[in-house]
Amino acid sequence: MSQVPGRSWQEVVDMQQEKSGVPEGLWMRCSACEAMVYRKQVAMNLWVCPECDHHYRIDARQRITQLCDPDSFEPKWTDITPTDPLKFEDLKPYKQRLKDESSKVDHPDAILAGTGYIKGRRIVLAALDPNFMMGSMGSVVGEVLTCAIEHARERDWPLIIVSCSGGARMQESALSLMQMAKTSAALARLDDDGGLFISVLTDPTTGGVTASFAMLGDVIIAEPKALIGFAGPRVIANTVRQELPPGFQRAEFLVEKGFVDRIVERRNLRSEISRIIDYAGK
Amino acid sequence: MANGSYEGSFQLEFEKPLVQLEKQIAELERHEDAAGDFASEIKKLRASYSTLLKKTYAKLTPWQTVQVARHPGRPQSIDYIRTFVKDFAELHGDRRYGDDPAIITGFGRIGPYKCMVVAHNKGKETKEKIACHFGCAHPEGYRKAMAKMKLAEKFGLPIVTFIDTPGAYPGIGAEERGQAEAIAYNLREMAKLKVPVVCVVIGEGGSGGALGIGVGDRIAMLQYAWYSVISPEGCAAILWKTGEKASAAAEQLHLTAKENLKLGIVDEVIDEPLGGAHRDLSATAEQVEKWIVQSLRELNRYKVDNLVKRRYDKFRALGQTAAS
């Protein structure tokens, strides 16, 4: 069992307590293997089930805490906040949705980004947050990512983006769609300048996020069993009217098909990222 | 009607009264010689037809616009290619896996310019439609598009794309062969192509499948085309939990040409003839050709570095005011 570096388990538990999506209490039932597991133990295990190795979804703050050297992370671009450019309204006005979602996270939209160190290596890091509108990419996510990419390029630091997203955000329509082009264009420049981009795919990474920056990593790593794809499994099942093959669109499937370089368990992410930086970073 | 060359058997719900009048006029015209003089009657009907046509198209709702964009008689890429791309030499295949008929690529001349044409293809006859998955391209389609765009870049040819797709194909093979990677790669590579790229959304601009050949220096939309992050039905199914709210979703998505112009997603709206492109291909094609030639003329003036920088800045600015 590996601990979050430099943090007591109590800090980790506190940080995640209300955001993990798993019911409160000392004990919890693993949603994958249904075993009763001690919550503190799960937290100490980086929110991976000690029984079955199921990787729970974690929010951006927790992700960054797990990856960065203690207290090395400096958040940036947190002054970029969402507006409601289309005055979008479905069953709930987007404005209201933004307000409701903002109480679930400590940053303005579905992303937290900044600079930090991983095992002493300077990096630019961005993590998408599933607790804010399922990590969907609207103008803020696109803008913050682009700022992060440009920052990595200017400083010549390795860039790490941890994806966890349902795709482009519908409530900003074509503006969301254009964030795919914007982030990809910024990555084109980083690529031309020989910058290193490590893309980390976690459960789930789908839609417009997969079809833009997430698939453009120099090295693409994925957490075990993460759902990764373009179209959602339900949409595909409805289109082809046949049962989807077992393991379809899981990280292991993408490795088999040649679209992911490595599957890395959460407890090894720090050391794996460090290793890649040592090979490919500057 | 003189211009009623679109598929007669199909009619949009809101066009039914129009089609009714068209039939009446045609009927009278047919009997004119035999049974006497209907000239004044025909004239009257024609007048009310054109009034009704104007009235109907003056206030199309976003959902009706989507229906016009999907009209089976609406001109497709291949119609524009046949109308004004001279000496078109189609090039097949992605040199990796196969040849996706849902994307057409090839050399051709537009006005005075030798170009590479890259276009979605929906297909005309049932068999062809099925082979093209109704305009939904597979990864090999996007890779074919990129291979030919790089060919164009190598030989300094400008690229012209016609966008008309409900979306990239959501299927097992498409996922296995990396639909997301294929689109992502195109977005990155199109951003740095060292030749002018102009794009026209001629019908449906369905999400990433449209954008996959849509990163350009100049982007136009036909007046009754739509362009959005998701189809109205898809959006309704997710946000309203029922596909029947597609009309409301269409409104909220701001997917019309006018709205996309306002948002800065496209640079220009190309007007369609009264009653939509399906009523007059040649008039529509003339406008599209004119816009392409004019855009290429302007873009030719830029030095390569400046061209690529301007393209970057154009996309870099999108969504900046929406995130403040």
Image (spheres, rainbow, N blue to C red):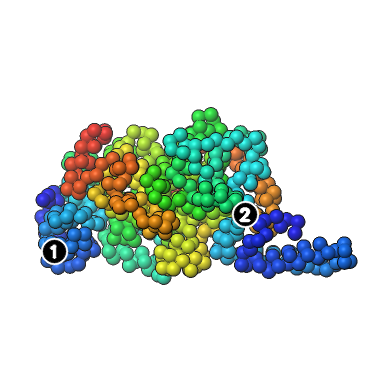
- Given residues B233 and B319, the one toward you in this image is B233
Q: Are marks 1 and 2 on the same chain?
A: no
Is residue B307 visible from the viewing direction of this image?
Answer: yes
Which image quadrant for residue B74?
bottom right
> In the picture shown, does residue A87 fall above or below B272?
below
For the question of whether residue B301 can be seen, the reply is no
* x 73%, y 64%: residue: B22
**Chain ID of residue with mark 2:** B
B161 vs A190, left or right, is: right
Q: Which label was assigned to residue B51? A: none
Q: Give the residue pinned by disc 2.
A: B74
Q: Position of residue B210 (x, y in %)?
A: 49, 49
Residue B313 appears at what percent x and percent y?
46, 43
The answer to whether residue B314 is above or below residue B87 is: below
How far apart are the alpha carbons under marks 1 and 2?
A: 60 Å
Describe residue A47's horizontal placement relative to residue B194 as left or right.
Answer: left
Q: Amino acid at mark 1?
A: Met
Q: Secondary structure at mark 1?
A: strand
The residue that disc 1 covers is: A36
Is A36 on the left or on the right of B263, as rendered?
left
Please identify the quarter of the rendering in which residue B273 is found. Answer: bottom right
Kindly identify which chain the residue marked by label 1 belongs to.
A
Q: Amino acid at mark 2?
A: Arg
The answer to whether B88 is drawn above or below residue A50 in the figure is: above
**Viewer-nearest residue: B107 or B222:** B107
Quarter of the picture containing the C terminus of chain A is: top left
Q: Residue at x 41, y 70 (%)?
A: A91
Where residue B6 appears, as percent x and y from the top left, is 67, 56
Identify the residue at the far right of this view: B36
